[in-house]
Image (cartoon, rainbow, N blue to C red):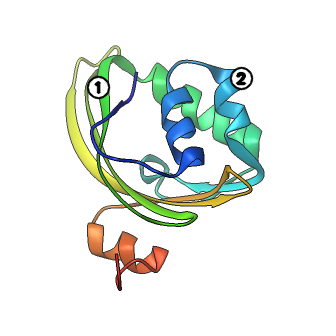
């Protein structure tokens, strides 16, 4: 289960994180049919559509023997959200321990996630989301 350690007002983003690890059907429902996702672990090669997003999520979940996923910070304005995501875990098979943080820049359309770009640093995520002034 994703631990959201901060106030997250955007209902679409909250539902996305709540369903991420637990319920494939609920997760699918959080996604806009035209979703574009540029995940950090895939060198930000854009994935298009719900099926591609679900495959990416499923492959990510299968990577871990054990893991913890937390949302530690959120900056949001209407349907633009930047979330600091912290992942710690141990790889399935390899046993390698991982502890990483990245900033997920998200756009919501009609209550569903339409765009995700994973950034390595806060400033680039905020700039891309248009959240640098008047956070």
**Count of numbered labels shown in the rendering:** 2
Residue at (47%, 74%) from the top-left corner?
129
In this view, 26 is above or below 93: below
x and y percent of residue 93 in the render? 33, 14
Residue at (25%, 25%) from the top-left corner?
89
In this view, 66 is above or below 74: above
Q: CA distance from mark 2 to mark 1?
A: 21 Å
Of 50 and 126, the residue lying toward us: 126
Residue at (35%, 82%) from the top-left corner?
134
Left/right placement of residue 11 relative to residue 84 reads right
Quadrant that contains the N terminus: top left
Left/right placement of residue 52 relative to residue 61 reads right
x and y percent of residue 4 in the render? 34, 36
Residue lying at the far right of the rendered structure: 33
In this view, 102 is above or below 22: below
SS for dot 1: strand
Residue at (27%, 66%) from the top-left corner?
121
Left/right placement of residue 134 relative to residue 24 reads left
Of 83 and 124, the residue lying toward us: 83
Q: Which mark is residue 25?
A: 2
x and y percent of residue 50 in the render? 74, 42
Residue lying at the far bottom of the rendered structure: 133
- Label located before the other in sequence (2 or 1): 2
x and y percent of residue 72 in the render? 26, 45
Q: Residues within 10 Å of mark 1 (few under 14, many from 20)?
A: some
Quadrant that contains the C terminus: bottom left
Q: Residues within 10 Å of mark 2 (few under 14, many from 20)?
A: few
**Residue under circle 1?**
68
SS for dot 2: helix
Left/right placement of residue 129 relative to residue 84 reads right
Residue 3 image-quadrant placement? top left
């Amino acid at each position: 289960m994703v631990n959201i350690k901060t106030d997250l007002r955007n209902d679409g983003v909250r539902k996305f994180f709540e369903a991420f690890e637990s319920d494939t059907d609920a997760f699918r429902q959080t996604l806009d049919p035209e979703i574009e996702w540029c995940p950090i672990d895939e060198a930000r090669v854009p994935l298009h559509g719900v099926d591609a997003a679900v495959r990416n999520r499923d492959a990510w979940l299968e990577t871990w023997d054990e893991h913890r996923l937390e949302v530690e910070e959120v900056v949001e304005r209407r349907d633009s959200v930047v979330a600091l995501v912290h992942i710690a875990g141990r790889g399935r098979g390899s046993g390698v321990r991982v502890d990483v943080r990245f900033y997920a820049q998200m756009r919501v359309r009609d209550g569903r996630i339409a765009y995700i770009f994973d950034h390595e640093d806060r400033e680039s995520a905020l700039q891309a989301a248009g959240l640098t002034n008047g956070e």
